[in-house]
Image (cartoon, grey):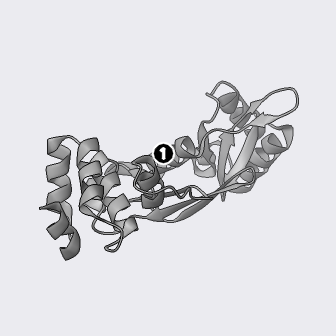
Amino acid sequence: MSVLKQIKSKVTYAKIGHLYSASQFKDMGPRSSVYKALSRLEAQGLLVRVGHGLYTKVDKTSQYKVLPGAEDVVRQLARQLGGRKQGRVQPHGAEVARRLGLCTQMPLRPQFEGNVGQQTLHLGRLVVKLKPAVRAVRPLLGSPAGEALSALLFLGKQQVTPQTIARVKGQLSEEQFDSLRRHAVKPWLTRMLE
C-alpha cells in the first residue's frame, strides 16, 4: 500500500481536531514521501497545516472548513512534545487575568505558556503562540494556582492590590491558595499574599 493510502486510512477515522506530526508517520515510508502525502491530504481538504510538520484534521462542511479551538490544539501539542515529562500548558497571564475579572483587556492573539518549547501555530488566520513558562510558574503549571500566579505576575506590582488578592483568593480553594503563597517568588507578591 502506498504511503498516501496508509496515512489517509489512519487520518480518515480519527476525531475532528486530532493533531498529527509528520514524525508519527515515519515508519510508513521515507520522510519525503510522508511530507508529500500530508501535502496532498491538505490539498484534498482532509488536513490543515498548523505549523512546521504539524497537521490537524478538520470538519469539512459543504462550503467551510471548521478548525478546532486553539486551546485544544495547544494541549494536544504539549502532550505530543512533552513525552515522559508530561507536557503541560495553560493560558498566558493576560487571558487568565481577564477570566478572573482582574482586568478587562482581551488579548488579540491567543498565547499559552508551558513546559515545552516555543511554537507558533496557524489556525486559519489565527496565529497562536506557545511560549516557555517563567521559572516561578513552572512548578504550578496547568493548575488553578499556576494560572492565578501567572495572572498576578502579568499584572505586576503596580496593579496588584489587596482587592485583587481577595478576588483571586475567592476563586481558589484554600489548598490552592496555600500553594500559590508558597510559590510566590517575587518579594512584593509574597508580602501581598500574607
Question: Residue 14 at x, y = what percent?
Answer: 62, 28
Q: Amino acid at mark 1?
A: Arg
Q: Is residue 30 above or below residue 44?
A: below
Question: Residue 83 at x, y = what percent?
Answer: 39, 50
Q: Nearer the viewer, residue 29 or 155?
A: 155
Residue shown at the point (82%, 38%) measured from the top left: 45
Residue shown at the point (24%, 52%) measured from the top left: 166
Label 1: state its secondary structure. Answer: helix
Most distant residue in the right direction: 63
Does any portion of residue 30 appear in the rendered image? no
Is 101 left or right of 177, judged from the image as shown?
right
Is 81 left or right of 173, judged from the image as shown?
right
Residue shown at the point (73%, 52%) measured from the top left: 35
Question: Residue 84 at x, y = what percent?
Answer: 34, 50
Is 69 left or right of 140, judged from the image as shown?
right
Q: Nearer the viewer, residue 177 or 135?
A: 177
Rendering quarter of residue 46:
top right
Most distant residue in the left direction: 194
Question: Residue 144 at x, y = what percent?
Answer: 30, 46
Q: Is residue 1 above or below residue 119?
A: above
Residue carrying label 1: 75
Quadrant housing the C terminus: bottom left
Rendering quarter of residue 191:
bottom left
Residue shown at the point (14%, 44%) measured from the top left: 175
